[in-house]
Image (spheres, rainbow, N blue to C red):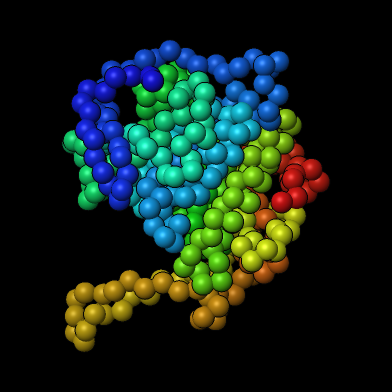
Amino acid sequence: MPSTPRGLLAATTTGIALVCLGVAAAADTTDTTGPGPSADRRPLAGLRVLLSNDDSMQAAKASNSDGLGLYEIRKALCDAGADVVVMAPWQVQSGKGTAVTNGGTLTLARRAQLPAGYGNDCAGAPSGAPVFGICLSDGPCGPDSPSATPADTVKFALRGGLAAKAGWTGGPDLVVTGINSGPNVSAQVNDSGTVGAAIAAIDQGVPAVAFSSSGDASHTRFPLANYRAHARFAAAFLGGMRERDLFSGRFALKVDYPDVSAGQRAKAPVWTSVGHGQVVWHAYQPKRAGSDSYDITMGVCADRPGDRCTETVKDADSTALLGRGHIAVAPVTADRTYGARADATRELAGVRHYITHDAPRS
């Protein structure tokens, strides 16, 4: 283990045993390098991956909306040879975009007992493959502790957290975010904490890929089958990118996976653009006549057609994913200036060729 914490607390949150660690705890800063090229021929052997999300690391809800996808992709990445460290929000932070916290104290809670079925997934990883949740608290994270945002977790990890808690003085090779509970396409990409965490990584020049999976037809449940299929695809997808030297810190990739929970297969990945239409919309209903309090409600455009729900981008991610059942891949940059020229044209062309011709099919 990389360090001995300043204080230990056995806590139970939604049935989870956790060890809470103060950020200022002493650290072993020994760098880890992973196995040599001849020792392990798995496609991600020796790759150091920071894994975060916006759904938390709790994985306690029956809907599978609070972090189960994180454990599925962690397993797939480790099976492919990666050394994976999780630093994720303590509570669900869906919709937080690129929000950051400007003051206060961050505290890490190391998860001592992982969800059933995932406990031995990364056994033997050089870092020990710890799973941390990060809360906003000057003391141990508790059931009601507010959470760090997705961008907070990545910024903290890259600016000292990984060195202190995993011994990665050189930082990670790649940041992976997700697998999110629900797709992140079209207008709501700006709201996505999963994408926001990836943007926080490329802001620091670290390559990043954000993965999101569709829910079932009810839009309220997120089947294990979708996460599992997406995780297998993600590991193979990243392995192919690594083999071709396509990781870039100049843009992030956003990968959305269709619903396959009824036995259908995902169609081949396609190169897309972020659409401009809405798929999910927010509404605000007064609690009572004349009230200053409003309930926040959400719906999908299938239930509320209209101009804002009409997609106008020809190669939109939402059309490929939701309308045609493809795996939708789109590049995302931190520069939101209208009409800005990409400064990585050759790199983008290489990734696009990979998606179109060589990426795994499902």
Tell me if residue 305 can be seen: yes
Residue 317 placement: quadrant: bottom right
Which image quadrant: the N terminus? top left
* Farthest top residue in view: 30
Task: Report the residue at 58% width, 36% height from top.
Answer: 77
Q: Nearer the viewer, residue 217 or 204?
A: 217
Q: Nearer the viewer, residue 83 or 203?
A: 83
Tell me if residue 332 can be seen: no
Q: Nearer the viewer, residue 276 or 291?
A: 291
Relative height, residue 54 to residue 188 (above, below): above
Looking at the picture, how far across and down is residue 321, in whole percent?
65, 62
Looking at the picture, how far across and down is residue 61, in whole percent?
39, 57
Task: Report the residue at 68% width, 30% height from top.
Answer: 43
Relative side of 341 to 191, left or right = right
Looking at the picture, how far across and down is residue 139, in whole percent?
18, 35
Residue 345 placement: quadrant: top right
Count of numbered tags: 0
Task: Report the residue at 50% width, 49% height from top.
Answer: 69
Task: Report the residue at 53% width, 75% height from top.
Answer: 301
Relative height, residue 101 to residue 290 (above, below): above
Relative height, residue 167 to residue 312 (above, below): above
Residue 290 placement: quadrant: bottom left
Looking at the picture, how far across and down is residue 123, in whole percent?
51, 28
* Farthest front residue in view: 117
Relative side of 18 to 176, left or right = left
Q: Nearer the viewer, residue 36 or 326?
A: 36
Relative side of 127 to 99, left or right = right
* Farthest bottom residue in view: 289
